[in-house]
Image: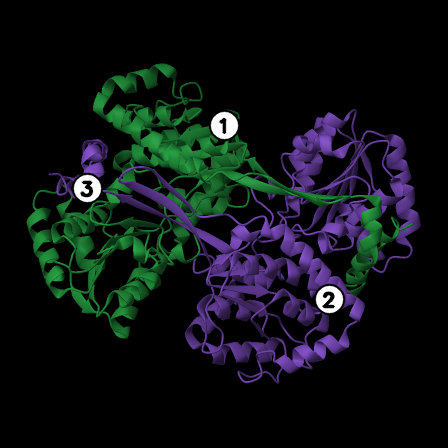
Chain colours: A green, B purple
């Protein structure tokens, strides 16, 4: 059962405070141990990488068997359902189709004689994709992180993932990685894998950017190598906000709130509704449906701590609060949801109508499921092709055109007191 | 005189090491004092802001006179040259024209019945622009930071800049801010200004992103508020790389290397050339031209410590080294420079031919002068309209279309062990 509050100022502020409090603080012990690992890998390369991998993951790994072989991938295909393979292939097709629309063209501005300027899009050369081990090894994340990099034209995609004692990687993850098009997969994880990607070792090539989720050691090491390489957003606890009016189906809304809650005790599931009746029915449906769910305990704790139902007077108010929350996922279970899309200013991804539940987007539809969390949809975007390209501009002026504007440029340079800048134009004056 | 090395492996590696060593390390004393300021502003708002401003800048500031008035702006116009105003207006027009080409359209994917997906571009609501005080108050930076935000459609642009004892702001900066279209200008600076923008106070509105250069206190406070708000890149020391063949004009090349060097003792000016003759002549020209430059000492020290001429056997090698350096500015003083543009993989901005010197781009041509430094052009881009918009995706499936793919989605959810995700689809099945 989720507690219900009124959508007044106090209630809203309290909830926003609660949401913000879930942010992971920097942990100085973690920083200390991660820093040591980073330094060791930077200094000693492979030998340190193997040492740490033996310490944390499997004792049988060495630089000879660290790379996943073609046989291991073939083997993985034999271990998973044909139906799973087909579903992943279909999902990949959908993700490709959507991300293909995100590509931008380089442009040139050449409408005045003697002046040419432009902007080129250039794919990153090499990208590292981190995939967690254990129960958080999600094939859907593999697709969502690798596909935009492929579409962007990245030369080489290096995936890393820790193994279990038996040197095994989740076969679903291997199949997804192969379908998505990972160029190389290394059996390493943790801060040592992030360090290897950031600095390069004898075996692991240095990359330009590291993406993908991970535990606090992975997240902290990504933060610490940022600048040496680029990184994606550091994901916070996951969130859903459902905005529902009296036309919503409480059975569906309850299911969707719980699907978010099962991720993590810190996950947040919120419902804003104009209907007290819907609020009550959603809580009843949660009671009914939760019984059959594997992660019952996590869901209960998440809903109790971070779940909320906010009762509002009208839909306008719902969107006001929604934009303050800036949720990762926003479901609009309301009449005529499309007409309200312009009211959404801050949200990672919006799910319109009763038959577009969040898992449709998590797994299948096409838009990316790597989304801004913790209210950062105010300024961050979903992972996209843009994250795997960079821009570079260029300028050409002819001798004649430079003469025409030489005085303007020298005037500004003088104002700024930069006489060597002025001189660079002056020596070119007739 | 700049020292000359051979473009062999050892020489290249040594120079890259030197470039990297210029990176500003995190300074724990600065972190400590900045953290205190951030906490105080977050907790006490205006009263702490005024206290710190009185301590560091002017004793006469209070929350009544902290906002620059229209009279002060009018006054600034009277204090600067008409020629300067005209030059800034022309520069702004050029910057607008170039950045206008960077705008992207929202898209919708609706080619299959019952499925609609799309991506919307939404401008950030409010942006803070930091402008340093003192000698580093550059009107050109004001234009380069504000114009892309305007073109992106940001609702409100809040500029902050510290005042001198007499409550004065550099009139050139005020004029540039007015021409660029700053909505509000506050007379605050340092970590306290960054904190006010990040958290908001009674007077200063909270923003979504903070851009603009600053000293180590400003840079450190930007890093620390990152996540609460977005920030731009933290700029490192500035760099130029000139690639020159025997057709280059040594007088021009010398002038351009010095124009970079005058910024800062840590600035780096590099020349890669196929011609020993050009190398020698450039050094001679430096000796001649430096005499008349105001910042002679800075230039000398910068060239001595971080300047280099790398002699290579052929142009191909020049581009190989150039891409390793990944310079902020790259000048191609070679025959037929356009044909070599595709060889440039890593560079912030490229200047083609002998009449397109870096100051043309710094002040006037149109492409942004806020560029990735310290080799980060490997993965970062020039400041652009993209930095002031965010994306948000949306998904709609009809009841019928969801039925068709329900099994696929449930298959993947099951594989990941997320039964509440599966349930969200299951409750919607007929």
* Location of residue A107 (image quadrant): top right
Q: Which mark is residue B135?
A: 2
The picture places residue A396, in percent across and down from the top left corner, at 74, 43
Determine which residue is flagged by label 3.
B399
How many angstroms separate mark 1 from mark 3 (CA)? 40 Å
Q: Residue at x 33, y 36 (%)?
A: A141
Residue B133, x across and y down, in percent = 67, 69
Residue indicated by mark 1: A156
Query: Which chain contains the residue that carries disc 3?
Result: B
Distance Cα–Cα, label 2 vs label 3: 64 Å
Q: Chain of mark 2?
A: B
Q: Quadrant of residue B279?
A: top right
Q: Is residue B252 above or below residue A78?
A: below
Is B143 placed left or right of A49 in the picture?
Answer: right
Q: Is residue A254 left or right of A132 when viewed as pictured?
A: left
Q: Is residue A189 visible?
A: no
Q: Quadrant of the N terminus of chain A?
A: bottom left
Camera-side residue of A213 and A368: A368
Q: Residue furthest top?
A: A71
Q: Of helix, strand and loop, which one carries label 1?
A: strand
- Camera-nearest label, 2 or 3: 3
């Amino acid at each position: 059962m989720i507690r219900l509050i009124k959508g007044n100022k106090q209630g809203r502020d309290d909830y926003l405070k609660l949401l913000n409090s879930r942010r992971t603080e920097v942990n100085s012990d973690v920083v200390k141990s991660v820093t040591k690992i980073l330094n060791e890998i930077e200094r000693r390369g492979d030998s340190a990488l193997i040492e740490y991998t033996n310490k944390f993951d499997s004792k049988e790994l060495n630089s000879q068997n660290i790379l996943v072989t073609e046989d291991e991938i073939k083997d993985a295909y034999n271990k998973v359902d044909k139906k799973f393979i087909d579903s992943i292939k279909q999902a990949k097709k959908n993700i490709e189709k959507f991300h293909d629309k995100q590509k931008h063209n380089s442009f040139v501005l050449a409408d005045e004689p003697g002046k040419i300027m432009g902007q080129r899009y250039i794919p990153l050369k090499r990208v590292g994709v981190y995939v967690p081990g254990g129960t958080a090894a999600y094939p859907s994340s593999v697709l969502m992180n690798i596909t935009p990099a492929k579409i962007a034209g990245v030369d080489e995609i290096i995936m890393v993932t820790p193994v279990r004692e038996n040197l095994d990687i989740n076969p679903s993850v291997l199949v997804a990685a192969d379908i998505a098009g990972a160029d190389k997969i290394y059996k390493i994880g943790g801060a040592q894998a992030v360090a290897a990607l950031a600095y390069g070792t004898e075996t692991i090539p240095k990359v330009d950017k590291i993406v993908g989720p991970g535990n606090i050691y992975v997240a902290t090491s990504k933060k610490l190598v940022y600048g040496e390489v680029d990184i994606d957003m550091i994901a916070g606890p996951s969130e859903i906000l459902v905005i529902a009016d009296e036309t919503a189906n409480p059975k569906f809304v309850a299911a969707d709130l719980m699907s978010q809650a099962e991720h993590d005790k810190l996950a947040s599931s919120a419902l804003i509704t104009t209907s007290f009746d819907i609020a009550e029915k959603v809580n009843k449906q949660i009671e009914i449906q939760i019984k059959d769910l594997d992660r019952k305990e996590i869901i209960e704790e998440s809903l109790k701590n971070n779940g909320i139902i906010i009762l509002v007077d009208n839909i306008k108010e719902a969107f006001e609060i929604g934009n303050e929350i800036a949720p990762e996922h926003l479901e609009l279970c309301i009449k005529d949801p499309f007409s309200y899309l312009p009211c959404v200013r801050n949200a990672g991804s919006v799910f319109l109508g009763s038959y577009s539940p969040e898992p449709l987007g998590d797994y299948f539809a096409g838009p990316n499921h790597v989304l801004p969390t913790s209210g950062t949809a105010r300024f961050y975007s979903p992972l996209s092709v843009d994250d795997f390209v960079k821009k570079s501009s260029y300028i050409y002026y002819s001798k004649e055109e430079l003469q025409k504007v030489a005085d303007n440029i020298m005037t500004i340079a003088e104002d700024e007191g930069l006489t060597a800048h002025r001189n660079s134009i002056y020596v070119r004056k007739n």
